């Protein structure tokens, strides 16, 4: 699953470069706690994907955000995952009788890699053509920058 998070993070990172110009200056965090900034970040991320899902015409590329607890921990992670990735994990886990070592290696699957590449192309084309999606991404980018800045400030103290 870690590679899936990396793939989605890569999509966002790739998109962040050309869109950074739309983001403008980061506003002050207005004294918000790290917890509140995290909630704002998750809300902005979910809003971004809601706009993406509205514009997207390929159901397998719809992104759902949720909380999940990785095996071995009680700490929930906020995850946003495309439908085709969730389906691939589910199918692979069923085929391999929940053998986690095999499930974890599914990112080497060429079909999944091709689908991921097409998903990334869809994301890029929708970003380029839709100011509403660009604005949602700018809000997400600002919320992420505010969260990261506050986290760094707290870690340096």
Image (spheres, rainbow, N blue to C red):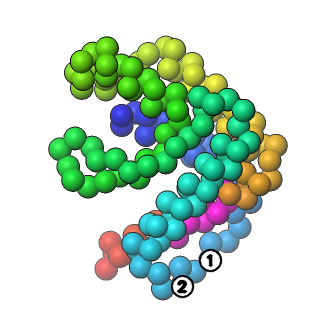
Instruction: Write the residue at 78% across / 43% down.
Output: 128
Can you see residue 10? no
Instruction: Write the residue at 27% across / 15% down.
Output: 96
The quadrant of the picture occupied by the C terminus is bottom left
Q: Is residue 5 left or right of residue 70?
A: right
Q: Tell me the SS state at disc 2.
A: loop
Instruction: Write the residue at 54% across / 62% down.
Output: 43
Point out which mark residue 27 bears.
1
The quadrant of the picture occupied by the N terminus is top left
Q: In this view, does 86 lie to the left or right of 20?
A: left
Q: Mark 2 and mark 1 in contact (Cβ < 8 Å)?
A: yes
Residue wearing tag 2: 30
Point out which mark residue 56 bears.
none
Where does residue 101 sit, x and y in percent of width and height?
A: 24, 23
Mark 1, residues whose alpha carbon is within 10 Å: few (<14), some, or many (≥20)? few
| Residue extent of the magenta highlight | 137-146
Q: Tell me the SS state at disc 1.
A: loop
């Amino acid at each position: 699953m870690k590679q899936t998070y990396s793939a989605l993070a890569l999509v966002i990172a790739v998109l962040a470069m050309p869109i950074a110009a739309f983001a403008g200056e980061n506003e002050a965090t207005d004294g918000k706690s790290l917890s509140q900034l995290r909630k704002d970040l998750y809300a902005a991320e979910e809003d971004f994907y809601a706009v993406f899902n509205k514009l997207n015409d390929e159901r397998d590329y719809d992104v759902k955000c949720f909380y999940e607890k990785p095996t071995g921990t009680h700490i929930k992670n906020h995850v946003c995952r495309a439908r085709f990735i969730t389906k691939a994990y589910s199918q692979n886990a069923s085929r391999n009788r929940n053998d986690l070592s095999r499930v974890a290696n599914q990112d080497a699957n060429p079909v999944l890699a091709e689908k991921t590449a097409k998903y990334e192309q869809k994301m890029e084309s929708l970003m380029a053509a839709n100011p509403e999606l660009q604005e949602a991404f700018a809000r997400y980018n600002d919320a992420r920058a505010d969260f990261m800045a506050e986290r760094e400030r707290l870690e340096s103290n």
